[in-house]
Amino acid sequence: MPKIGMEAERRRSLIAATVDAIHERGYSDVTVAQIAKRAGVSSGLALHYFGSKDQLLAATMRHLLKDLGDRIRERLSKAHGPRQRISAIIEGNFAPDQFRDAVIAAWLAFYVQSRTTQTNRRLLQIYSARLASNLTYNLRRFMPRDDARLVAEGTAAMIDGVWLRQALKDGPSAPSRAIEMVETYVEIQIRYHTENTTRRGAKNKIILQ
């Protein structure tokens, strides 16, 4: 009889093998048989668990999204106030176990496949909407709602852009540098909108006098 928990362990092994195989060979060239061999199981068992390569990639992305969410929640639990929560969200997106070459390659494949695979598109839309919503909620403490939404979209675009640029680089990933770039953008935006609010308040006070 199979050991208790063996299926869950095999699924985890196949997901880890998928990330590594995509990094080594690219999504288009890698096969289920190659992934299964790397995971130490048969290709038939891999297909039994996931059904197809596309479904295996979707399962891998769900796993990576859960890990990403866990890293963000872990940092949010220690944050105090909206500014620290924004930083926690940014840092969580560049957690060392996420922002590494193999995972970056898998995310790049995920973005490409989302153009033609409905399941992957939906996962990406959920991720994007959640990121923008969380950022907007905290940015509203520093600026009007519409401005907060715009800055949240800009911040999310920077996060995604840094990931994409890293996928095109040959050198090792640098989470601290990535965090610094995004934090600088956010800080400039908060300062700009805070100063604008102060100026508008002073102007209105003069008019009322």
Image: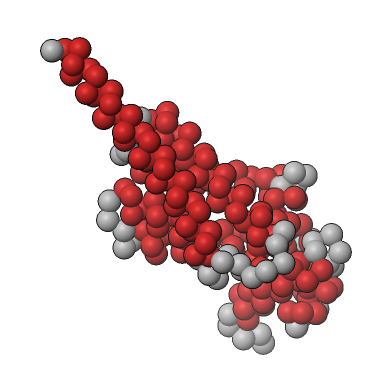
Q: Nearer the viewer, residue 101 or 168?
A: 168
**The C terminus sits in image quarter:** top left
- Whole-percent x, y for residue 146 in the image: 42, 28
Q: Nearer the viewer, residue 203 or 109?
A: 203
Q: Residue at x 23, y 24 (%)?
A: 201
Image color mode: secondary structure
Q: Residue at x 58, y 80 (%)?
A: 5
Q: Quadrant of residue 72?
A: bottom left
- Whole-percent x, y for residue 139 in the image: 37, 41
Counting every numbered tag in the picture gives 0
| Residue 44 visible in the snapshot | no
- Whole-percent x, y for residue 53 in the image: 79, 61
Q: Residue at x 27, y 51 (%)?
A: 81
| Residue 109 visible in the snapshot | yes
Q: Nearer the viewer, residue 56 or 21?
A: 21
Could you tell whether 42 is left or right of 152 in the image?
A: right
- Whole-percent x, y for residue 155 in the image: 50, 45
Q: Residue at x 41, y 43 (%)?
A: 188
Q: Nearer the viewer, residue 206 or 85?
A: 206
**The N terminus sits in image quarter:** bottom right
Q: Is residue 38 above or below residue 173?
A: below
Could you tell whether 191 is left or right of 131 in the image?
A: left
Q: Is residue 153 above or below residue 60?
A: above
